[in-house]
Image (cartoon, helix red, strand yellow):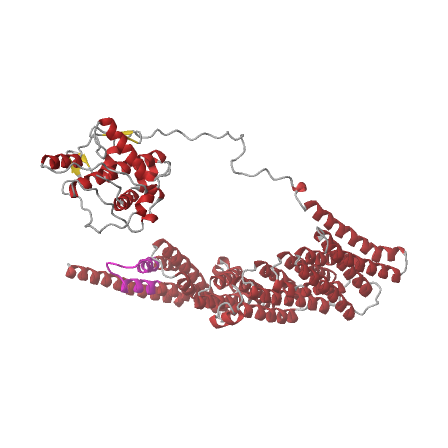
Amino acid sequence: MTTSIDPALVARLSGEFDSLAGEFTALGGQMNTLGRDLASLHRQVQSVASARTDSPGTAASPRPVPGESDLPECATTGTGHQPGGVAAGIGHATEQTAASSGAPPGRVPSSGVGVGGVHTPAQPDPASSAGEAASGAGAAPPAPATTATPASTHAQPAPEPRAPWTQPPGAAWQHGRPTTTAGMYRHAMSQVPPPRTTPPPRGPVPPRGDVPGSGPPSPPWWQREGVISRLLAVAGVAVTLIGVVMLLVLAAQAGIFGPVPRVVAGGVLSVALVGAGMRVFRRPGGRVGAIALAATGFAGAYLDVVAMTTIYDWLHPVPGFAAALGIAAAGVGLAVQWRSQPLAVLVVAGAAVLAPFVTTELALLAFLIVLQVTCVPVQMRYDWPFLHLVRTVPAVLAIHLTILAFVIEQPGDRRTLVLAAATAVAAAGLVGAILVTRQRPGDLVASLTCALAITPLLAAPALVDRPAATILSAGYAVVLLAVAATALVPKLRDIARIPGHTAIVAGTGGSFAALEAVWGVTTGSTLPFGLLLVAACYLGVAGQARNRVAALFGSCYAVLGGIGLFTVADPETLSVSRRAVEELSAPTAAAAIAGLGVLAVALWTLRRIFGTTTDESVITLLWIGASGAALYLVTTAAVALGVAAGAADGFIVGHCVSTIVWMAAALAALLYGLRHLGAEASATVKVALGSGLLVTAAALAKLFLFDLATLDGLIRVAAFLMVGILLLVAGTRYARAFAETGSRESGAA
């Protein structure tokens, strides 16, 4: 009998072993060898059993499997075996086993087989049992099995199709042992001892203080690449420019050379330095030196123009400013072409720092403003924060020092020029910041420089008289607050596209300018009223727009107005008739009434911004503070109105009215709390009841401790009668409210 390996069985067995790929991976190479041996053994057993069961005495024909050539390499050739395939190896091993056991070829001994270094238990041979039964019945003995290589299998003609192979019932586990591939594999694996794991080899222990994976320690700063060269370049720029200043100023003071040689020498040196820098820039590694040379040349030329305009008077200020603008624009333009912020910074800083050594006249402010304005287009295109600072700080500092000098010396002329310079710096800073932040909304340095630039104009009102200062401050406040208001109105916000940090800077500057304007239009007695009015406006806008920044500004104005009012109407002034007559007036009463309005708007704004809260401690503190402030403001307003009326008993009448108002406010709070009283009363209702009782106690204390000793005649009688009537109303309503609440609860029960 001729037996060959069935390709269909090979394909099915490959699929079964693919489902067990995870277990093969865990066991590694040793299990791969075991799996191949088990697969070879099972295919040989199945081929023999199929040949004897289907057609005894007839050789089993191989069943072709489509796509056999696509099988894995381990299923066709065998990994780690000689060429010739698994089938040849299996057939050879089977013949040797059969020969050694005395069995005919194609028979598998039942005494067990050592596979892959693992001994599998003995299994009954269903093929041999079937053969013995057939021989007993007179059937022909089976032909010996023959082996076939994959090449020979492909060369054979396609056999007739036959029914697909099905496992007979009970074939998965016969005689207590598995017969399927998966069962044989698991049974064999149960007898394989677990592999011994060895710890991974340890690497060399790193020295103490070194972290594995970290790079070598960084060298000192003086050994880093480019540091020394940059320091030397900056030092060279500074020294050379100082030499240029000495050539233009000290040589003139000492009488060395004439004006023309000095100016010409400075100009020739500047042009030569710029030309050398442009030539060095084209060479490898010449960027640092080229920047230093070009910056020195442009700054020197700028100083040369300053000297020609201010020292030698060769140029009128207007052409001088134009020439300086051209030189600064050329230097910054070259920096843009080279993409070099250091070049632009060195040009501007060198000219701005050394220009005061050339001249200290007012024309210096114009030359510094020229540097500030020249760099605005560059800032719109490139994010160079250091250029922001060096173009703004020198001009701002110079104007502040000039204003301080004018305030101390009180010169009668040229104040208008300083005022114009402060206006120009503020305009350049504000417009530049708006243009830059529209392009880059996250540029905080632009807003910072804007905040610096608007400060000189805030200090400029000290140069002029009060009416002019008030007009200047009011106009400045309108402009800045208009810029800040664009962030509060949605339509304007979309059009202007001014970021929040720039709007905050403008709002802060506008608030200070408004404070100066209020100071200018008020006196000592009317100042609190003006501050409280502005505070009410800020708080109203904050509540409408739900803007916390505006609420902060309004709170600051309210605090200032409250301090001013308390300074005029302190407790001693309110309690002593003589002092009240001297200090209090109608503006004081107006300020107190404005304070009550600010208090109401502030409570509304807090609710709009932060919403309602259920925290009783917060509500209690808020109402206690508001109630105390309101009582003080009511007393101040009543006494100030009584004194301002000019009556002889104005002070007494004012206190009588304030006591009655206290009791009326207490009654209003009690009525509000009692109206909303219930089983689930809110925290506000509870605080209203508590505040009403506290104010009632305060009104009674004032009535008996102060009014009884101060008031006299009908005024005292009126105070006691009104307070008594209000107390009766409060007591009656209080009792009825609790009775109604009790009846509702009993009815619900």
Note whether residue 223 is visible: yes
Residue 742 lies, with reference to residue 227, above or below; the image says: below
User: In which image quadrant can residue 341 be found?
Assistant: bottom right
**Residue visible at 22% across and 40% down in the picture:** 46
Note whether residue 396 is visible: no
Residue 185 lies, with reference to residue 467, above or below; the image says: above
On the picture, is 310 further left or further right than 549? right
Quadrant occupied by the C terminus: bottom left
Residue 660: image x %, image y %?
A: 38, 65
On the picture, is 249 further left or further right than 449? right
Residue 271: image x %, image y %?
A: 80, 60
Residue 92 lies, with reference to residue 355, above or below; the image says: above
On the picture, is 125 further left or further right than 455? left
Q: Nearer the viewer, residue 550 or 564?
A: 550
Dominant SS type (magenta): helix
Residue range corresponding to the magenta coloring: 666-693
Residue 10: image x %, image y %?
A: 28, 44
User: In which image quadrant can residue 48 be found?
Assistant: top left
Name, please, the residue furthest toward the left. 137
Quadrant occupied by the N terminus: top left
Residue 8: image x %, image y %?
A: 26, 46
